[in-house]
Amino acid sequence: MISFASGLGAVVGLDRSAFGHTLLAHPAVAGTLLLAVSGASPDAWLFLMVLTCLESSNPVVGGVRDWGSAALVGVVLGQGAAGATAWALILMWSVVVAGVGGGAILGVRSVAARSMRAVEVAVEAGDAGRIERIHFFLIFLDALRGGGMVGLGLVTGRFLLPRGLDLAAAAGVEGWLALIWTVAPWGALPVLCRLHWDRTRRVAMGMGLAGGFVLWAVGVMGGIG
């Protein structure tokens, strides 16, 4: 599953390049595609809802959090996860992955910015082949970043998760971690509402209310316990 998720992560990375822009990098989209293969659970859906709320706070242009990779990492780590404590750790690790992935995105953008001078030289020389090579290289960097981020996040997460559970049990903080997972959706949902609440947009409001109802239903079914 790590290799498959890393491959999907590379495709998600491409979606941030000139090759994509299809919304595949959105955590709800990428995570749902992976759930279709790996199998879904109420907790996994709840996890994606939380990331979707957090992703909505990103700037439309220039966002520096990689929530797409975080969604893929969390979905895979969540396979076989038992209880709210495990999901709390998975959520926290996914936030770390999103932050590190955002730094990697800025790194790729920095490389692209430095490549503009080479593009200008190629344009002046009429060297179309060099322009294409630079373009494909930058697209490849996005794919490499996406696949590498998911692979690294999964390998490291699988190493840290059981140790984190053991430490939580030894320190007696399992209840506090479970509380994080319990309140996470209710903490993230106001972020989504604050950014998109508009009485003139009744369809968007209806979808938001429907999302809130789904969160409530998942909690009633025991998905956060």
Image (spheres, rainbow, N blue to C red):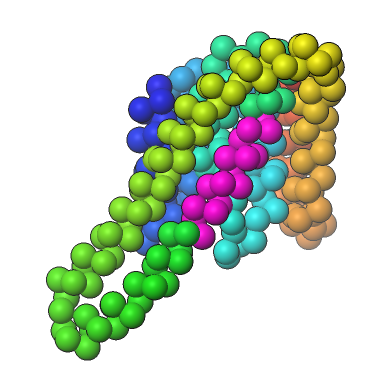
| Quarter placement of the N terminus | top left
Judge whether residue 219 can be spotted in this image.
Answer: no
**Residue shown at the point (35%, 54%) measured from the top left:** 141
Q: In terms of image quadrants, where is residue 7? A: top left
Q: The C terminus appears in which quarter of the rendering?
A: top right
Residues 165 and 11: in front is: 165
Q: Position of residue 32 (x, y in %)?
A: 51, 32
In this rendered view, identify the residue nearer to me: 185 or 164: 164
Q: Is 104 contained in the magenta span? A: yes
Q: Is 179 left, or right, of 157 in this rendering?
A: right
Task: Please provide percent x and percent y for residue 85.
Answer: 73, 18
What are the residue bounds of the magenta stretch?
Answer: 91-106
Left or right of residue 134: residue 215: right
Report if residue 59 is visible in the image. yes
Q: Is residue 115 left or right of residue 73?
A: left
**138 and 200: which is toward the camera:** 138
Q: Quadrant of residue 135?
A: bottom left
Residue 221 magenta-drawn?
no
Horizontal and vertical percent for residue 78? Answer: 58, 21
Residue at image coords 47%, 59%: 107
Rendered view: 54 above or below 94: below
Q: Main secondary structure of the magenta part?
A: helix
Residue at 59 percent across and 51 percent down: it is 65
Image coordinates of residue 3 in percent, x first then y, are 36, 27
Q: Residue at x 69, y 16 (%)?
A: 165
* 103, above or below 94, in the image: below
